[in-house]
Amino acid sequence: PTDAQRIFHGRGGLHPGCEHWALDVFPPVVLFTSFQPATDAELATVGAALAARWQQIAPGQPLNWVYQCRFEGQTDTRLMTGSVPEPHMVVEQGAQFRVNLLKGQNHGLFLDMAEGRRWVREFAADFRQSEGRGAKVLNLFAYTCAFSVAALQGGAAHVTNLDMARGALATGQQNHQLNGLAPQGASFLAHDLFNSWGKVTRGGPYDLIIADPPSYQKGSFVA
């Protein structure tokens, strides 16, 4: 694949015994994630399967794959074979995003929310056509602002991005620049939502509010 995408979603429950596994591709890198520790034998089996498949779809090209284990609050990330570009840019539905597979739990783009971003892009386009103006969007728990990029590409007039993490918002600003989006089309607020109702309210009213929070973030948010 040329687009970043999820290949296998074990949490979907369709493959008993594999609920703790996910396989993503952030071209040119494959990422295998396990939410339980994987044995050396399991990793060897996965690696051999990936190598065999890679030779079928990209003969002669090296396999780049990363393993990440996320278990009981701990993260173990390993480059198994090949290399990871730096900086690493990927494309999804025509939009570009900066990602980092070797640092931290999260990589800059949640691939299981691809259809959510598609919906936002289509909503923004339909709103502009039906209302004769661009939508005003509030993007809560914005992270690296992928929803904002989708909304603006669809024709939104302005997106307010709010997240506590300044580093994530800085990457979000880079994502807007990567896609040639006008600086005045988005604002980036590094605030705790629950202490910032005044700022949020003053920016309204909004035509679309996006809330995609973490399920559990110690010290700040529990869904």
Image (cartoon, rainbow, N blue to C red):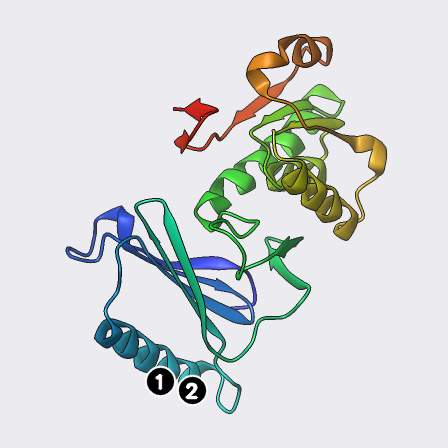
Q: Which of 129 and 25 is in front in this view?
A: 25
Whole-angstrom CA distance, mark 2 to mark 1, is 5 Å
Question: Percent position (x, y) of residue 48?
Answer: 31, 82
| Residue 54 versus residue 190 in the image, above or below | below
Determine whether 6 is above or below 173 in the image.
Answer: below
Residue at 84% x, 39% y: name it: 182
Indicate the position of residue 16 as horizontal and vertical percent values. Answer: 15, 55
* Residue that appears at 59% across and 53% down: 93
Instruction: Find disc 2 in the rendering and name its residue.
Output: 55
Instruction: Determine whether, in the image, residue 172 is placed left or right of residue 46.
Output: right
Q: Residue 156 is drawn in which quadrant?
A: top right
Q: Position of residue 190 (x, y in %)?
A: 68, 28
Q: In this view, does 182 lie to the left or right of 175?
A: right
Residue sitting nearer the eye, 93 or 30: 30
Q: Give the residue type that dot 2 points to.
A: Gln
Q: Quadrant of residue 15?
A: bottom left
As shown in the figure, which amino acid type bears the numbered disc 1? Answer: Ala
Q: Is residue 77 above or below residue 109?
A: below
Q: Which residue is drawn at 76% across and 23% down?
A: 133
Residue 50 location, x and y as percent? 36, 77
Q: Is mark 1 on a helix, strand or loop?
A: helix
Q: Is 7 positioned to the left or the right of 204 in the image?
A: left
Q: Report the disc number at residue 52.
A: 1
